[in-house]
Amino acid sequence: MNRRMMIIFVDASHTDDVQRILEDCDPLGYSELQGVLGKGATGKKLGSRAFPGSSTIFMAAMSDECAADLTKRLEALRETRGAEEGLKLFSLLTEELL
């Protein structure tokens, strides 16, 4: 069965907002990776004094309809919070093998 794997990157300070949106969208399931360090368009987040902060990554498998709903809700969040929070959304078409 084909599904969408939605991958969400967000500043750790906004993790709760994304969790609420995911729960409202009712995906088949999701995973949350906290304390992610790295560099992106909004700069470095290395958990250090020089580059404070971290990100959270969510991965959620869902139908196309759920993915469209999630996208709209995250767009609204981004408009409210601003692009500088580092909210990013990626979609992959996946096939469940097992």
Image (cartoon, rainbow, N blue to C red):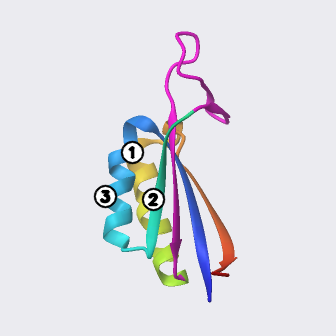
Q: Dividing the picture into quarters, in which one does residue 50 lie?
A: top right
The picture places residue 14, in percent across and down from the top left corner, at 38, 42
Crowdedness of circle 2 by 10 Å Cα count: few (<14), some, many (20+)? Answer: some
Q: Which residue is mark 3?
A: 20
Can residue 88 be seen in this snapshot? yes
| Boundaries of the magenta span | 37-63
**Residue 41 among magenta residues:** yes
| Foreground tag (1 vs 2) | 1
Whether residue 52 is situated above or below residue 2 in the rendered picture: above
Closer to us: 78 or 44: 44
Q: Which residue occupies 46% across, 64% down?
A: 30
Which amino acid type corresponds to the residue marked 3 in the rendered image?
Arg
Q: Specify the label residue 15 is tagged with.
A: 1
Can residue 75 be seen in this snapshot? no
**Which one is earlier in the sequence, the residue at label 2 or at label 3?**
3
List the single residue furthest toward the top: 49
Label 1: element kind: helix
Q: Which residue occupies 62% across, 89% down?
A: 1
The picture places residue 53, in percent across and down from the top left corner, at 49, 25
The picture places residue 85, in percent across and down from the top left corner, at 48, 38
Which amino acid type corresponds to the residue marked 1 in the rendered image?
Thr
The picture places residue 13, in percent across and down from the top left corner, at 38, 35
| Foreground tag (2 vs 3) | 3
